[in-house]
Amino acid sequence: MIDEKYIELINKEIDKEINPKEKALLHEYLNSNSEAKNLYDELIASENLLDRLPDNDPSVNLKKQILNSLDKSKYSRVEKHSRFRTFIYQTIFQTRYKIAFTFTLGLLAGLFIYSLLFNNQATEHNNIYGTIGINSEVIKSIPVEASNIGGKLDIKWINNNLGLDFSLNSPEQYNLALKFNPDKTKFDNISFFGKNKIKLDSEENILKLSESGNHNYLLLFSLKAEMTVNFNLQISRGGNIIFEKEIVVINK
Amino acid sequence: MENEDNNLVNRCLNGDGEAYSALVEKYYKIIFRLARKILKNYDDAEEITQSVFVKAYENLKSYNPKYKFFSWLYRITINETLNFSKKKGYSEEINENITNDEDNPGETFDRNELGEKIQDALMELDMLYRLPVVLKHFLNYSYKELSDLLDIPEKTVKSRLFTGRQLLKDILIKKSVLEDD
């Protein structure tokens, strides 16, 4: 017969939870009780046998299987944040990113300052846009019909300037001469519409050009506060005048 | 080591996939060997090991760094093992398949055979006793730590340990692995 108290002490010793006083008490008891000593020896031997259990290793693929079965996207949102932090870090601290960042920042700042400084000139931009057509007003459209040449001349106000807008098509070469009084008006420039450039000879009181094919060009004049402006248009071919027109424009 | 594990956990939570890989590398053999001592079948132990690391990964945010990471893994291992055993009726199946070695009383064992006999004896123990016996012996946890890990009172831990140890001794004697004086 073994006292329950000593069975507990035997187990406590195996579990290394026994204190010295309990240990002394247990061994004194074991020396006096062979049945208890027998149980003690068997339990110790049984416990020691557990150390003989084989320590098997898992298969070589187990780690791979574990990693493959994980939901990799689970923390990917955080990963994106991390990439964003990395980008910010690189932008601030790495030289090449720093240069790019500074340049971009400077460009944005420049655009911002520009928009602030020139904000009030938006109307003028509209005016510039208008001068190339929006605010134009056709006064008169003159058809040009002659031997082997066709088209028209639109006389228009473009803001406060006068424009002579030619659209002419001639398979043969023709010469155009436009006379005007330089005391009343001043030739400003010529604009081309289309692929072919026009070669224009400009003298004090006459503009001359020689062309063939299909052309559209605008001659722009500024007026010198006169009430009327006169133009003489001549189109000739081979020394013969094939079209002539006197144009009188009343200044608005 | 704790700091290193916590650091790896934090890195994983911040999206570093390699960090969890390092944790798996560090602990998968330990967890497998523990599972193998609790479960008879090699493939079942691998299944449990895989399941433990998947569960740990999925619940990584709930890990409290106040505790050791491997203790947390052990707790998951115990839960997974218990669930697995319940699902499979594991111990009954094993008991039916274990041979009665009383038929071969004079058999001598080499080291591998002895190991298998001890493993078989252990598997004959009900899971209720097998767990505290294995955990106490191989993890060397205190009664208090076992109480926390198994979520049972300390007194119950002691009682199951003492009974389990007594039963294991009797099985080993029955199998002639241990001599009866």
Image (spheres, coloured by chain):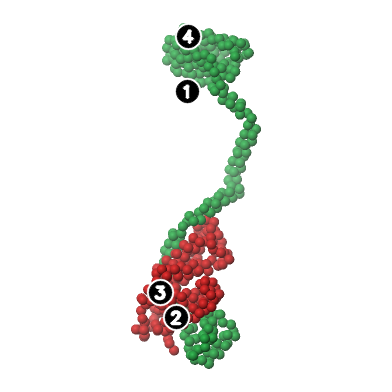
Q: Mark 4: which amino acid? A: Phe
Q: Is there one chain holding both mark 1 and mark 3?
A: no
What is the x, y in percent for residue B53? 47, 64
Q: Which residue is mark 1?
A: A195
User: Alpha carbon of mark 2 to alpha carbon of mark 4: how far?
Assistant: 128 Å
Q: Which residue is mark 3?
A: B91
Q: Mark 2: which amino acid? A: Leu
User: Alpha carbon of mark 1 to alpha carbon of mark 3: how far?
Assistant: 94 Å
Q: Which residue is mark 4?
A: A243
Q: Is residue A221 above or below residue B98?
A: above
Q: Nearer the viewer, mark 2 or mark 1?
A: 2
Q: Nearer the viewer, mark 3 or mark 2?
A: 3
Quarter that holds the N terminus of chain B: bottom right
Quarter that holds the C terminus of chain B: bottom left
Judge by depth and name the residue closer to the eye, A138 or A220.
A138
Q: Is there one chain holding both mark 1 and mark 4?
A: yes
Chain letter, disc 1 residue = A
Q: Is residue B96 above or below residue B54?
A: below
Q: Secondary structure at mark 3?
A: helix
What residue is at 46 percent from the left and 71 percent from the top?
B34
What is the x, y in percent for residue B114? 41, 79
Q: Nearer the viewer, mark 1 or mark 3?
A: 3
Query: Going from the N terminus, do you reach mark 3 or mark 2 first?
Result: 3
Q: Mark 3: which amino acid? A: Ser
Going by the image, does A141 lie left or right of A105? left
Judge by depth and name the residue closer to the eye, A42 or B95.
B95
* Neighbourhood count class around disc 4 (C-alpha, 10 Å): few under 14, some 14–19, many 20 upward: some
* Neighbourhood count class around disc 1 (C-alpha, 10 Å): few under 14, some 14–19, many 20 upward: few
Q: Colour of chain A?
A: green
